[in-house]
Image (cartoon, coloured by chain):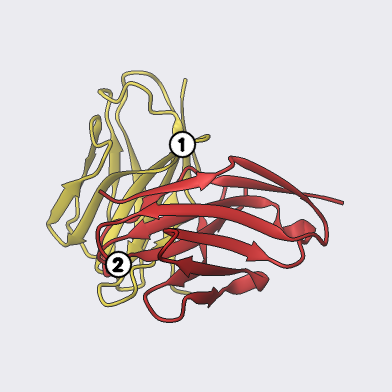
Amino acid sequence: DGGITQSPKYLFRKEGQNVTLSCEQNLNHDAMYWYRQDPGQGLRLIYYSQIVNDFQKGDIAEGYSVSREKKESFPLTVTSAQKNPTAFYLCASTPYHTGGEQFFGPGTRLTVL
Amino acid sequence: AQSVTQLGSHVSVSEGALVLLRCNYSSSVPPYLFWYVQYPNQGLQLLLKYTSAATLVKGINGFEAEFKKSETSFHLTKPSAHMSDAAEYFCAVSEGGGNTPLVFGKGTRLSVIA
């Protein structure tokens, strides 16, 4: 089945540690996105990538980093510089020639202990 | 800059009653508009989208939304609520379509009372 997978589903991290969240898609979509979701805040854009080896900062990029070495993969690293990383993280993708709708993965819940 | 305002962070309706979730947008160009639904601890699922075709858009699960340019609104409705409709709903806007990032509202949590 085609889709977007995120792993792990739940992730626990100690303060001061970097952690990487995985996002993979087999939909052959060109663009991929990372969002952060906090209660009552909606979804806020962290980073996005429209083509391989290129990405742009979103509204809340500080303390995060990404890479896009392959079309199907867009991992997100939450660094120790992110002051409040506990949140639900959602990955999405979209093909280029569509009406713009994004397809979402199931999410990763990160908790900092 | 584009933005989305969802009026009401929490809406409660009785089973069988009309569902109305409000969304107003701001955009400098004709927008692409979307409604998504999210169940607890899951990703978002597209309910429906407006991409400059018909102003009344029908989506999945009996939902529909009407694009009103004069009111800059894209409210979501369903004639009769079902218990399974209880979820969080997000309105989103894109100015470019294609792979332009979406801007989301803060969401409205819908509760359905038996």
What residue is pinned by disc 1?
Answer: A41
What residue is pinned by disc 2?
Answer: B30
Q: Residue at x 44, y 73 (%)?
A: A2
In the image, residue B9 above or below residue A63? below
The count of marks equals: 2
Q: Nearer the viewer, residue A74 or A48?
A: A48
Label 1 to label 2, Cα distance in Å? Answer: 25 Å
Question: Is residue A97 at least partly visible in the picture?
Answer: yes
Q: Which numbered disc, 1 or 2, marks the residue closer to the eye?
A: 2
Q: Is residue A86 left or right of residue A46?
A: right
Q: Secondary structure at mark 2?
A: loop
Res A20 quadrant in image: top left
User: x, y percentage for residue A87?
Assistant: 45, 34
Disc assigned to residue A64: none
For mark 2, does the 10 Å Cα neighbourhood hold few (<14), some (14 to 19), or many (20 or more) residues?
Answer: few
Q: Is residue B77 left or right of residue A33?
A: right
Q: Colour of chain B?
A: red
Q: Is residue B111 left or right of residue B89?
A: right
In the rendered image, what is the letter of the chain coloured yellow?
A
Q: Nearer the viewer, residue A13 or B111?
A: B111
Res B28 quadrant in image: bottom left
Q: Secondary structure at mark 1?
A: loop
